[in-house]
Image (cartoon, helix red, strand yellow):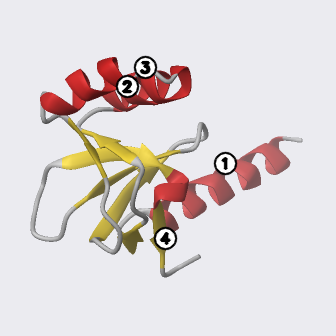
Amino acid sequence: MKKIILVTIIMILMASTAVAGSKCVTNGGYPAAVSESLLDEAITYLTQGDTAALQRLLNTGYVVILKDGITVYRQDVTWSGKVEFRLPGHRQTFWTLTEAIDCECE
């Protein structure tokens, strides 16, 4: 039983290492934010159809709507369907939904 758990943990670690740093391209129309919590807030407003609240959030500059075809590097992926990424040459990371970026390794 311990071997099965150990093998499972090793496989998970290998998979998460493989996706980090992957070169990707954005799909337009999805929200992206400087933090995971701000992304959650934007998704809530989109789901509720509250365009006024979403626009106020967009006006802060901490949340944007992605344009199509921007090259990015994937940094992290969560189990909840979110991905952390950064622009080439930059250290600042952003959060979006996994379907918002397409990566070469997939």
SS at circle 1: helix
SS at circle 3: loop
Check if mark 1's residue and mark 2's residue have beta carbons within 8 Å: no
- Is 94 located above or below residue 80 in the figure? below
Mark 3 burial class by Cα count in 10 Å: few <14, some 14-19, many 20+: few
- Give the residue number, with chain letter if any, for mark 3: 50
Instruction: Identify which amino acid the numbered label 3 is placed on.
Output: Asp
Q: Is residue 81 left or right of residue 11?
A: left
Check if mark 1's residue and mark 3's residue have beta carbons within 8 Å: no
- Give the residue number, with chain letter if any, for mark 1: 9
Picture coordinates of residue 57, whole percent (x, y): 24, 25
Q: Residue at x 81, y 41 (%)?
A: 2
SS at circle 4: strand
CA–CA distance in space, label 1 to label 2: 42 Å
| Quadrant showing the N terminus | top right
Q: Residue at x 29, y 68 (%)?
A: 72
Quadrant hosting residue 41? top left
Badge 1 or badge 2: first in the primary sequence: 1
- Give the residue number, with chain letter if any, for mark 2: 51
Picture coordinates of residue 40, whole percent (x, y): 43, 26
- Give the residue number, with chain letter if any, for mark 4: 102
